[in-house]
Amino acid sequence: MGISRSTYYYRPKDNLAKKKRDADIADLIEKICYEHPYYGYRRAAALKRKGMIVNHKKVLKIMKKMDIQCRKARRFVSTTNSKHSLKVYPNLAKDLVLERPDRLWCADITYIRILLPALYTWQQ
């Protein structure tokens, strides 16, 4: 015949099926992202519940390709204590209309207690 053995036994890769499977995985990942926005790329269990078994590295690769990022779940921490017996000053800038920049300045003073080591004492 005049052809090599590797040419005779060559079978082309089925890239179409692979691309279709990746598209199906991408669709499932997108649905899961809308349902659970805090899920990261380690969503193998969620994909398994949907009937798709995929490695987390594959999920990460697809998420990077689709530019999907998850939001970090953060616990709400209240930093303002409004229930105190101290005097509450009115907001003087509440009804102020600003016509141009540099008309209103404000500041906040925060005190941070720092414990000094015994070696560094203040000399008077």
Image: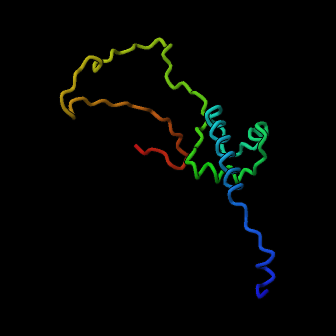
Q: Nearer the viewer, residue 21 or 85?
A: 21
Q: In the image, is 116 to the left or to the right of 110?
A: right
Query: Residue at horizontal 76%, vertical 85%?
Result: 3
Query: Residue at horizontal 79%, vertical 46%?
Result: 53
| Outermost residue, top side | 85
Q: In the image, is 60 to the left or to the right of 52?
A: left
Q: Nearer the viewer, residue 80 or 118?
A: 80
> Residue 51 at x, y = what percent?
79, 40
Q: Nearer the viewer, residue 20 or 84?
A: 20
Q: In the image, is 97 to the left or to the right of 109?
A: left
Report the coloring of the rendering. Answer: rainbow
Q: Quadrant of the N terminus?
A: bottom right
| Outermost residue, left side | 99
> Residue 87 at x, y = what percent?
40, 13
> Residue 93 at x, y = what percent?
28, 21
Q: How many marks?
A: 0
> Residue 102 at x, y = what percent?
21, 34
| Outermost residue, bottom side | 2
Q: Quadrant of the C terminus?
A: top left
Query: Residue at horizontal 21%, vertical 26%?
Result: 98
Q: In the image, is 49 to the left or to the right of 32?
A: right
